[in-house]
Image (cartoon, rainbow, N blue to C red):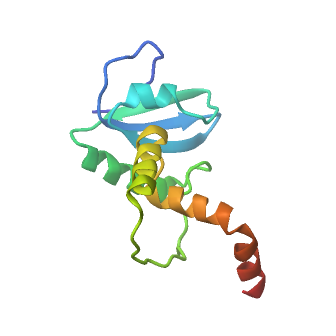
């Protein structure tokens, strides 16, 4: 299927990817309910386009590919050539894990971003010291 112009009257859910434009491409995302997600987006845009996909996995893969290639200014994931991260394993209390999963589902934000933001806010002073130390 080709890219289609999004209409505010759209209601029927479908899996796909969407692109937001404000003069230029500013954001690419995916969702299991593209009409609902586009309408609830917190980014300001002039218009949106969408492409229906056969599966969420296919939508995620195309989203990542397009973000890496086009580097929309509002996307943070997949835009850095070298991503400085450190993977680690830890146990979370069940109420914290549920809160993370709820925010992930409602806000459509990657779990890693939610955890990093929460830790960065709680550890701001220590993050600043670490950044100064290099």
What's the residue at 60%, 48% (across, down)? 74
Q: Residue at x 27, y 44 (%)?
A: 56
In depth, the one of 126 and 54 nearer the eye is: 126
The extreme bottom residue here reads 133
Residue 2 is left or right of residue 47, and the answer is left
Image position of 130 (left or right of 69)? right
- Residue 15, given in percent of the width and then of the height, sits at 29, 35
Q: Position of residue 85 (x, y in %)?
A: 51, 76
Q: Is residue 4 visible?
A: no
Locate the C terminus by quadrant.
Answer: bottom right
Residue displayed at 42% across by 26% down: 36
Asked whether 53 or 34 is in front, the reply is 34
Locate residue 88, reporting x and y percent. 43, 78
Q: Position of residue 131 (x, y in %)?
A: 73, 79
Please tell me whether residue 28 is drawn above or below residue 71 in the rendered image. Answer: above
Determine the residue positioned at 75% across, 87% down: 133
Left or right position of 93 against 131: left
Question: Which residue is farthest left?
Answer: 54
**Image quadrant where residue 6 sits:** top left
Q: Which quarter of the figure has residue 23? A: top right
Vertical comparison of 30 with 45: above or below: below
| Nearer to the camera, 99 or 32 | 99
Q: Tell how many labels.
A: 0
Q: Nearer the viewer, residue 22 or 86?
A: 86
Decide if residue 68 is in sight here: yes
Q: Point out the image quarter for the N terminus.
A: top left
């Amino acid at each position: 299927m080709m890219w289609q112009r999004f209409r505010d009257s759209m209601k029927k859910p479908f899996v796909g990817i969407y692109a937001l434009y404000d003069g230029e491409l500013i954001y690419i995302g995916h969702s299991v309910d593209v009409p609902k997600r586009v309408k609830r987006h917190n980014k300001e845009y002039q218009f949106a386009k969408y492409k229906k996909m056969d599966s969420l996995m296919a939508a995620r893969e195309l989203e990542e590919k397009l973000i890496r290639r086009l580097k929309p200014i509002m996307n943070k994931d997949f835009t850095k050539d070298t991503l400085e991260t450190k993977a680690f394993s830890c146990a979370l209390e069940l109420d914290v894990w549920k809160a993370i999963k709820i925010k992930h589902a409602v806000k459509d934000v990657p779990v890693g971003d939610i955890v990093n933001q929460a830790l960065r806010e709680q550890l701001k002073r220590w993050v600043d010291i670490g950044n100064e130390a290099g």
